[in-house]
Image (cartoon, rainbow, N blue to C red):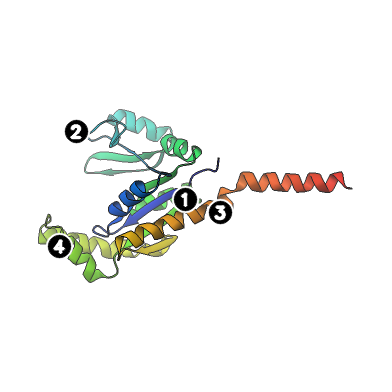
Amino acid sequence: MSKGVLTIVSGFSGAGKGTVMKGLLANYDNYALSISATTRRPREGEQDGREYFFKTREEFEQMIAEGAFIEYAQYVENYYGTPKAYVEEQLANGKDVLLEIEIQGALQVKKLRPDALLIFITPPSAEILEQRLTGRGTETPEVIAMRMNRAVEEAAYMDAYDYIIINDQLEDCIEKTHRLIQSQHAASSLQSEFICRIQRELKERKESKA
């Protein structure tokens, strides 16, 4: 069984990255969504191991000390992190693991796992991004302005990603993202076992004919 591809998906708020990931999970059966650990309290209807792995602050900090996270961060007095064991288990089972995180977390993962695929989802223009944020009808003009200002900061890191995917037509964006992830299976960094085996076989054949 070939090992899965770890894919980090980031993008501006309003770019549609969450919708793209839902589309991948709905349309194809080879994806697994990474589940984060958090110290925040469960909301009504949330279950441990489904939305999040819910941890106490002491449990989370113990996991940090043990190096149990691929990446972690603290937001508004709560920790959030990606447990290494869960991701490795899914990858070993051949699942392509999707991880939606902010840019700083994505770059942490890339440093730890150079074979991770970094994809940045973006709308075709700043104007369309603002239209999408406004079209939600759920945020005040002040929040929209804050998100647009944050997008300016995030755009400075776009060239650190392996691929930039423009989310213009949703179905096309989902299909393009899927093809990119599947093409990564042929990357040499994910074919180390095969490379070692073919090298060994060729060496053995050469020695047997010497």
Contact? badges 3 and 2 (CB < 8 Å): no
Disc nearest the viewer among 1 and 4: 4
> Which amino acid type is shown beneath numbered disc 3?
Ala
Mark seen at residue 134 = 4
Numbered disc 3: secondary structure: helix
Disc nearest the viewer among 1 and 2: 2
Q: Residues within 10 Å of mark 3 (few under 14, many from 20)?
A: few
> Which amino acid type is shown beneath numbered disc 4?
Thr
Q: Residues within 10 Å of mark 1 (few under 14, many from 20)?
A: many
Contact? badges 2 and 4 (CB < 8 Å): no
Disc nearest the viewer among 4 and 3: 3
Dot 3 or dot 1: first in sequence order is 1
List the residue tagged with mark 3. Answer: 186
Q: Residues within 10 Å of mark 4 (few under 14, many from 20)?
A: some
Mark seen at residue 210 = none
Label 1 vs label 4: CA separation?
A: 33 Å
Residue 198 versus residue 165 in the image, above or below: above
List the residue tagged with mark 2. Answer: 45
Mark seen at residue 116 = 1
Q: What residue appears at the point 11 percent right and 57 percent down from the top-left corner?
A: 137
Contact? badges 1 and 2 (CB < 8 Å): no
Q: Residues within 10 Å of mark 2 (few under 14, many from 20)?
A: few
Q: What residue appears at the point 31 percent right and 49 percent down from the top-left corner?
A: 22
> Which amino acid type is shown beneath numbered disc 2?
Gly
Numbered disc 4: secondary structure: helix
Disc nearest the viewer among 3 and 1: 3
Judge from the rendering whether residue 1 lies leftward or rightward of residue 125; answer left or right.
right
Judge from the rendering whether residue 109 lies leftward or rightward of residue 155; answer left or right.
right
Dot 1 or dot 2: first in sequence order is 2
